[in-house]
Image (cartoon, rainbow, N blue to C red):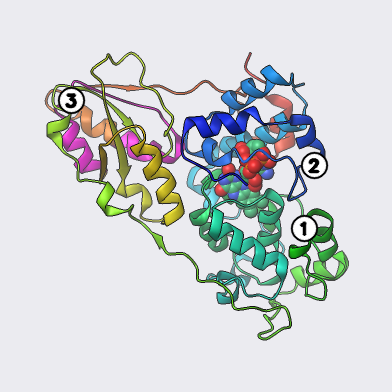
Amino acid sequence: MPTFEPSLQAARALLAQVQPDAYARTRNALDGAVTYLSPYITHGYLSLRDVYCAVHALHPLDAKHKFVFELGWRAYYRHVWAHLGQGIHQSLHPGLLPDVAYRTDMPQDVLEARTGIAAIDQAVRELYATGYLHNHARMWLASYLVHLRKVHWHQAAQWMLAHLLDGDVASNHLSWQWVAGTGSSKPYLFNADNVAKYAPAQWHSPGTVIDTSYEALDLLARSDTAVQHRIGSWRAHAGVAQPALTETPPGALWSVPDASLVTDRAVYLLHPWSLGAMPQGLGPDVVLIGVGFSDCHLQTPWSANRWGFVTDGLLSRTPQLWWGSVQDIAQCLQGARSVGWQPEAHADNALASLKALLQAGQAPPAVTAQSRPRLFEPVEPYCESFAKWWRYTKIVP
Ligand SMILES: Cc1cc2nc3c(=O)[nH]c(=O)nc-3n(C[C@H](O)[C@H](O)[C@H](O)COP(=O)(O)OP(=O)(O)OC[C@H]3O[C@@H](n4cnc5c(N)ncnc54)[C@H](O)[C@@H]3O)c2cc1C
């Protein structure tokens, strides 16, 4: 697994290694040819179009290639988010059990990676240590939590989102709903044979609750009784402490907004979802400011790993990092000549408020928001299934 250095160079190095045909054959295996690009896509080093174009240039891709299809899933989840907005935080339709049948706290043994089920404990340890999990491991962890431990998908999704370097609310919450069966036609279940087929030996989980048939798992998933964590079971081990999650970044590296740095200047704001953005047409004297909007993080704390990725990524672009409310940041930017940024759905509310506050000022700076080119044609109206969306969309030439 890469070390996920927050830089365009590291993103491009991973991109150059993508082998789409090997990916299509092996992506379900934990040691398969997956790309590890997601943290770079989430944080704005690479757009889906950048990824497609770079891979297509080396390995010409048919529009129906598995690799393009998987990029499509990410774009589809954005389509759903764009249409439903905050609605993705609720079950899209009823699942196996009513929402109230699920608990709204995380089981302590899962948080500490000591369930005694190797596949689950390995996944939690890896998530904490690296901020990354293979797609299949995410599915196992999600399925176990929702269907066997009866944790509400939203609670568990918020927990995983906070620890992932690639945490993206659309891909995350809608994938959880896909597993839970509230966003798909059936729940996703897995057993120990599936783990043995796709994961290395230290993940194998014989003799545990998941070492059973799909029929038995289906009954467990439909029952409103959670499977018990067997304290002292033979595979249980000491566990690990959950890394702390915080709503604020490492204090010493971020400052309060300072108007004197931007007076009469062309300013370009880099936010946590646009670490690789380049200012265009703002002149040679443009000043880059890294901004974190405290308003965005009240509901979504991050791990130190994720704050580190974002902070280091911003610091490699500019020494000026501002942390504050949209209001405070807007106040300091009032004296700027112009202010630019790259739009991104995670920051849209904050950026829309910022724009409104700037434009309400006495001598408002010119505001420019430059989006990145799309890979897939936008689809109207809302498609309730990926299959439908995929039929309607096409790659933008
Ligand atoms: C429970 C759960 C939670 C998830 N949470 C997130 C999340 O917070 N952020 C996130 O980016 N992805 C999430 N995913 C989707 C997927 O697991 C990751 O995008 C993928 O594992 C990232 O690793 P990679 O870049 O090596 O992917 P690769 O397999 O190499 O795929 C290449 C790219 O295609 C896209 N992609 C591949 N598979 C999927 C998929 N199933 N859904 C959406 N896009 C996909 C991603 O952009 C990925 O970077 C989640 C999946 C599950 C089951």
Ligand 1 closer than 8 Å to the CB at disc 2? no
SS at badge 2: helix
Mark sitting on residue 26:
2
Which comes sooner in the sequence, label 1 or label 2? 2
**Extreme bottom residue here?**
232
As measured in the structure, the alpha-carbon distance from the residue carrying label 3 to the one carrying label 1 is 55 Å
Contact flag, marks 3 and 1 (Cβ < 8 Å): no
Residue, x 74% and y 27% (percent of image)? 391
Ligand 1 quadrant in view: top right
**Amino acid on which disc 2 is placed:** Thr
**Amino acid on which disc 1 is placed:** Pro
Q: Can residue 92 be found in the magenta stretch?
A: no
Label 1: few (<14), some (14–19) or many (≥20) C-alpha neighbours in 10 Å: few
Q: Nearer the viewer, mark 3 or mark 1?
A: 1
Which comes sooner in the sequence, label 2 or label 3? 2
Residue, x 58% and y 35% (percent of image)? 79
Which comes sooner in the sequence, label 3 or label 1? 1
